[in-house]
Amino acid sequence: MESQDLINIAQEYGSPVYVYDANTIASQYERLVSAFAKAKSLRIHYAVKALSNISVLKLFKQLGAGLDTVSLQEVQLGLAAGVDPKMIIYTPNGVSLAEIEKVAAMGVQINIDNLSILEQFGSKHPKTPVCVRINPHVMAGGNANISVGHIDSKFGISIHQIPHLLRIVENTKMNVNGIHMHTGSDILDIGVFLYATEILFETAAKFKDLEFIDFGSGFKVPYKEGDVSTDIEDLGEQLSERFNQFCKDYGRDITLAFEPGKFLVSEAGYFLAQVNVVKQTTSTVFAGIDSGFNHLIRPMLYGSYHGIKNISNPTGRNRFYSVVGYICETDTFANNRQISEITEGDILAFSNAGAYCYSMASNYNSRYRPAEVLWYNGEAHLIRERETMDDILKNQILLDFKDVAVPA
Ligand SMILES: *Cc1c(COP(=O)(O)O)cnc(C)c1O
């Protein structure tokens, strides 16, 4: 996909618009699969919450992946995309027993992350296979907001509660067929991650009927030059070997599972927005675009960095800009960023816009959520229409106030 293709897409489908390159998604998937080639049985569940368009889910199905879901609705999206329920794992946190029962009844693999629900579910449905989410209390990354395996995290069943977990399994005679962990969003150090996997292996050995061990995700991709990214090939090599050894000790072959989101789709995505106004102030030059944190909230929510290119003027002189949105709140995408000289009307392309971008978009300021386009076989395909005023008004109820006493 060339810059000119992106410009053509913005012209054809309007701005702002998200564009995803199916080739990049496929090659990241292939890269992951080949990294773990030595594992006898491998299953990749794509984490739907990163980018949940049903055409993207179908693409993953075609590639041979399963899905990792965190809500009943994500499960339903997977089914709508034609994914076999057996290829879906459901890893929620803090949801009701009723929702878990609903999903289990669809034939989806459920994953329970607290002892209270585990005991209730096991008592009522001892025959339904259940995976348990363990919290190994390992800080995989540095940022407490995105590291979910540490001691203060709400996720998973603490490794210190394993005796209680085993007692529940024994009392209810329930069927635990999987062990799972998801330590957070950043694997910067493979050594730390492998340390967490040892805790998981030790736990897994205590369960007799396992079919798989799911090591979650946290694969880091570069967002800017010089960023650390997870050395997938090295991790794959080391973990596959260790996993095969575990299977030998365990007495039979089980499946090694992962559930990456960001790694598979982040770099495939571009967010295109048009510059409405170039505003020179006493201290900076603002480039105000036809978007805001209603469409891309990661920079404001997490301080995330997204590369920004002026694809309308790729070879201009670099100048410093603050790129801001049109929301009536501070919504700064980038501060003092060097970008090729911007003229009003230019199209800016944000990179790494595949993961947690559209899926976190909202209607704040009563703006429409953008269109989504999938680029494959050298062509653009619309996979979601831009919203319209009907979407904004849908579900709203206009009262007539006939019977309501309005104070004079
Ligand atoms: C969000 C999530 C993932 C995906 O994480 P990435 O950092 O996008 O790879 C995987 N598993 C679970 C349980 C998650 O909640």
Image (tube, rainbow, N blue to C red):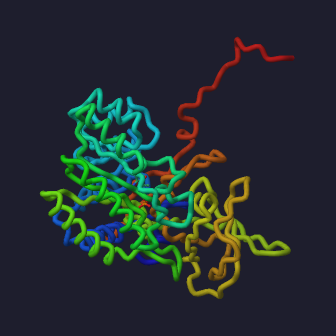
Q: How many marks?
A: 0
* Ligand 1 occupies quarter: bottom left
Residue 28, horizontal then vertical, whole percent: 33, 70
Q: Residue at x 35, y 32 (%)?
A: 119
Q: Residue furthest top?
A: 403
User: Image point 54% across, 69% down: which residue?
Assistant: 350
Q: Is residue 77 visible?
A: no
Q: Is residue 96 left or right of residue 252?
A: right
Q: Residue 368 versus residue 151: which sits nearer the camera? A: 151
- Taking the view exactly as shown, the residue that stands out farthest to the front is 163
Q: Pinpoint residue 298: horizontal percent, then vertical percent.
A: 57, 60
| Quadrant of residue 44 within the rendered picture | bottom left
Q: Quadrant of the N terminus?
A: bottom left
Up the image or down, 34 lies above or below 252; here it is: below
Pick the residue in front: 149 or 37: 149
At a point 60% along the width and 53% down the height, the residue shown is: 294
Residue 399 coordinates in the image, percent (x, y): 65, 22
Is there any visible trace of residue 280 in the rendered image?
Answer: yes
